Amino acid sequence: MMLFKDLISRNPSLKLKLNNFENKLLLKISGVTSDSKEVKLGFIFVAIKGLQYDGSNFIAEARKNGSALIISDKLIHEDIITINKGCSRHIYALLSAAYYKNQPQQIIGVTGTNGKTSVVEFCRQIWDQAGWKAVSIGTLGTRMPENQTLNESERSKNNLTTFDPSILHKQLNDISKNISHVAIEASSHGIDQCRLDGVNFSGAVFTNLSHDHMDYHKTKENYFSTKKRLFTEILKKNSAVAINIDDPYGILLYDEIIKLPLFILTFGKNKKADIMIKSITQNNHSIHLEINYNNIIYSSPIGMIGDFQAYNVIASATICIALGMDPNFVFKSLSDLLPAPGRMQIVSGHPKDASIIIDYAHTPEALSSTLSSLRQNTKGRIITLFGCGGDRDKLKRKIMGNIAQQQSNQVIVTDDNPRNEHPSDIRKEILLGCPNAIEIPDRNNAIKYAVSELKKNDLLLIAGKGHESLQVVGNQSLPFNDYNVAKETINNLINHEAIN
C-alpha cells in the first residue's frame, strides 16, 4: 500500500502524461490492473480500448470491486484521470513498473519471428553456468534456476508470450532480491501493446523476421517497425544489442540503429559479422560449430539438431559477450546447453529405430528450416504431422501445407488449437497447399497413427505445439501434450511386440 503521490514520484514523467490527478495524490494505492475482474480495494484500474473489448465499459465493475482510481483515454466521469500524452497501454505499463519498482540488475529482451524461446532459455543457462542466478520469461512461463517454473497459476491466467505489464513487473519485483539476470521474450504483440514499457533493459536480440501475425500487423513493414520499437524506443542508452545479419531484416535493423547510442554485435555467416559462423556441421543428434570472433577460431559441439538451433545458440552467445562476458567462457559453455522443451525435442525408443522429433515450428520459415535441417541426416522417409491454430494468421496455412509437401515424403494434416474456428475449415485451407496429405482430424489419433506407421530410418516431425500441455477447442482448454502421446504410443508398440 502506498500513496498515489509516492507512486508518481517514482516516475516523474507520469506528471506530464496525466490530467486532473492533483486532488488524488493522497489516495492509498494497493495495486494496478487493466482487468476489472482483478480489481481489489485500493487498485488503480486503467481502462484500455483493445481489439475486442473497451475497458471503459467495465469502469462500473472496477468501482464495485473497490478501485481507488480510474485512468482512461477519455473523460467519462469527472473523477476519472485522463491521459494527456501517450496511450492507456503505455501508462498502464509505466504505472505497473512504478508500483512494482524493483528489477533485476541485468535484463535482456529477445525479439524475432522464430527462436525467441530458445534464445532466452540459452541465455539463462549460460548465466547459470557463470554462477549467476538467472531466469527466462516467455512462452514456457518463468523458468528459474534448476529448471523450476514460477507461478504457473499466474502464467495460465496470462497466456501471453510477453506477459501483461502488472504480472511482468510484479514478477520482476518479486525475483529481484535473489535473481540478477533475466531474459524476456519480446513478442511483436507485446511490443506493440506496450507490455514491455518500463522494463530497464540492458540488452536486446534480433533473431530473424519472416511471415507471421499478418492478421494483426497486415504488412511485413508494420511487423518489422513493431519489432524495431524495442531497439529505438524501449532500450535505454548504451544497451547491448545482438543482430542476426544473415537475415535481410537484421541488416535493415542494423542500418537503422547504427547511429544510436548502443553497443552492437552482429552474428551470422555474413563475412561482415562480428561473430562469424565459419561452419555448422550436423552429426546425427549433435552439431559441431566453428566461430570466428576477433580473429580467434572457437570450436564447440552442441547436443542439438538443426542449423536454426545453431543460430539460436550463437544469438545467446553474442548478447552475453556484448554484455561483457568473457568470450572464452561463453563459447566453452555452449557444449553444455540443453534445448528448451518442445524445441527439436527427441522422443526416443521407437521399436523400429525410427526417429521422432517434437518441435514448436508454427510459421512457414520455422517449418521449412526444421525440415531442411532434418533432411540432412535422415536416411528414410520424413513424415510431417501438423495443423494450424485458429483465430490466427490464415494466410500462412496454405503456405505451410506447400512447404510440408515439398520437403516431406508424407504429410499428415491434423488439428492444432482450433480455438473458435471450425477445425475442418482450418484443415481445408492447409490442404490447399498439400492436396496429397492424409487428413486425420483428432490430433491424438493422428500422432498414434503416424508413430505406428514408422519404419526403420524414418523420421516423424510432430510440429506446431511443441511444449504445450493444453489444446484449445472453443472455450475449452483440454489436457494434451504431443510428447506424452508419442511416448505412450511407443510404449504400447513395444508391449505389443513383447506379447507377440
Image (spheres, rainbow, N blue to C red):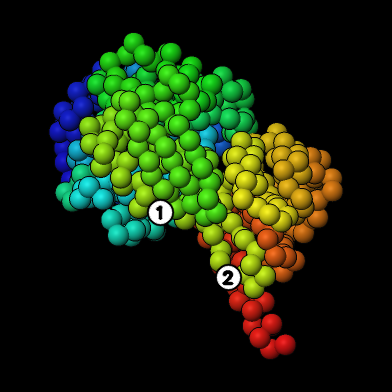
Left or right of 129 on screen, residue 315: right
- Tell me the residue at 43%/19% (across/down): 272
- Tell me the residue at 24%/21% (across/down): 238
Residue 313 sits in which quadrant?
top left
Relative image position of residue 44 (x, y in whole percent): 30, 39
Residue 338: assigned label:
1
Quadrant, the N terminus: top left
Left or right of 346 on screen, residue 426: right
Q: Secondary structure at mark 2?
A: loop
- Tell me the residue at 19%/23% (across/down): 12
Number of other residues with Cα within 10 Å of mark 1, as a class: few under 14, some 14 to 19, many 20 or more: some
Relative image position of residue 321 (x, y in whole percent): 28, 33
Relative image position of residue 3 (x, y in whole percent): 16, 37
Left or right of 138 on screen, residue 131: left
Sooner in the amino-acid sequence: mark 1 or mark 2? 1
**Residue 368 at least partly seen:** yes
User: Relative to the observer, which residue lies in front, 221 or 348?
Assistant: 348
Q: Amino acid at mark 2?
A: Gly
User: Considering only vertical position in the picture, is 359 above or below 351?
Assistant: above
Q: Amino acid at mark 1?
A: Leu
How far is mark 1 from mark 2, CA to CA? 20 Å
Left or right of 26 on screen, residue 414: right
**Residue 392 at least partly seen:** no
Q: Which residue is mark 2?
A: 349
Residue 169 sits in which quadrant?
top left
Relative image position of residue 491 (x, y in whole percent): 61, 76
Number of other residues with Cα within 10 Å of mark 2, as a class: few under 14, some 14 to 19, many 20 or more: some
